[in-house]
Amino acid sequence: MKHLLVTGGAGFIGTNFVYYWLKKYPEDQVVVLDALTYAGNRQNLTQAEKNPKFKFIHGNILGQELVESLLVIHKIDTIVHFAAESHVDRSILGPDEFINTNIVGTHTLLKAAKNIWIDGKLQNHRFHHISTDEVYGSLKPDDPPFSEKTAYRPNSPYASSKAASDHLVRAYHKTYGLLTTISNCSNNYGPFQFPEKLIPLTLTHILYGRPLPVYGDGRQIRDWLYVDDHCLGIDLILAAGEIGQTYNIGGNNEWANLDIVKLICDILDERFKQDPSLPGRYPDCPSSKGRHPQTLITHVTDRPGHDRRYAIDAGKISTDLGYSPQESFETGIKKTIDWYLVNPHW
């Protein structure tokens, strides 16, 4: 039985991971530590809080004494570290918070883990750090996907802060013997995602008849990963990943941003034709007025330092740990859209 501390567990990926883990490993203890900033929502965890194996702590990863007390009181042997500022646009406008949370916050967690686990002689422990493919920089159209051997070349304050945190995790393994693993994932999508991200933003704007902002020509390419497949990858790493190693988790699924927006428009338009209740619920949606949602697409000035293409080579985790995404983009995006339609409060 594991005792997990999940940082940032009230955020998008953390929430999905908590539900994944409680369902698959009902005997394990799961403690969530979350500061409940703009992207964290305790209501995400309403169902989890009914489970006696779950506990929520409102607090910040920058509080080393708090973290150390949680490790001791709850006998934590596994940290799964999601907590991070993660939106590139916000990092361009205000990088300080990204440096503080992503670098200093990660270092604070590492110090706490070292003090309790290494200095306390707890041999069986794991610090798993969640990172991003953005640390690798940008790819040209014909470049091979990012592998674990790709050099770091971050292009935004967000990506730079995550790159720094990756290096700190590696250093604590090499220097102090902390048992660490790292995963760098591609763009996640699915339930509970904060509406500033591309897919939920597109959905929300269509439903309320707002313009769909597309940066530049919209041909920026991303590899899209359904959030439960990300959770599966983390699970495999925790179960059998080699200590000190990094694993890239991807969806083998490259799409241009503009094509994603158009696909969501098409699927929503079809949903409105199939469900006569939707026009009444969303009267401002173009589909309620006989117009296609693609009429809302509006090209806006590209953001500074916008990476042109990301793509993940998930060969290592597939070969070494048997990872294989369970959702295609076609099935995953439909699940995502349907979740938002039946959860209008979100």
Image (cartoon, grey):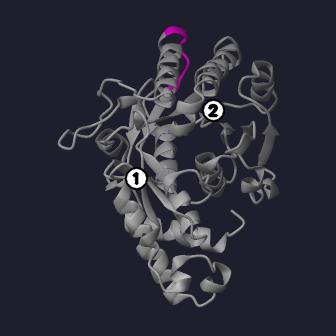
Q: Which residue is drawn at 31% across and 44% down?
A: 311
Position of the C terminus, as image quadrant, is bottom right
Mark 1 closeness class: few <14, some 14–19, many ≥20 residues within 10 Å: many
Horizontal side, residue 219 vs residue 54: left or right = left
Can you see residue 293?
yes
Tell me the residue that label 2 is attached to. Answer: 79
In this picture, is 90 found above or below 157?
below
Identity of the residue drawn at 50% across and 58% down: 199
Give the side of residue 52 with respect to residue 248, left or right: right
On the image, the x and y values in percent for residue 82 come to 60, 37
- Percent x, y of residue 29: 72, 44
Disc marking residue 194: none
Image quadrant containing the N terminus: top right
Q: Is mark 2 on a helix, strand or loop?
A: strand
Dot 2 or dot 1: first in sequence order is 2
Tell me the number on the disc at residue 224.
1
Circle 1 — which element?
A: strand
Q: Which of marks 2 and 1 is in front?
A: 1
Kind of residue sitting beneath label 2: Ile
**Residue interval drawn in magenta:** 175-180
Residues marked 2 and 1 touching at CB (< 8 Å): no
Q: Which residue is drawn at 56% across and 18% down?
A: 178
Q: Which of 217 and 88 is in front in this view?
A: 217
| Up/down of 105 relative to 306, above or below | above
* Residue closer to the observer: 161 or 71: 161
- The three-letter amino acid code for the residue at tag 1 is Trp
Position above or below: 304 against 333: above
For image coordinates 31% across by 38% down, the residue present is 316
Q: Is residue 53 found left or right of 326 in the rendered image?
A: right
Cα gap from disc 2 to disc 1, whole angstroms? 25 Å
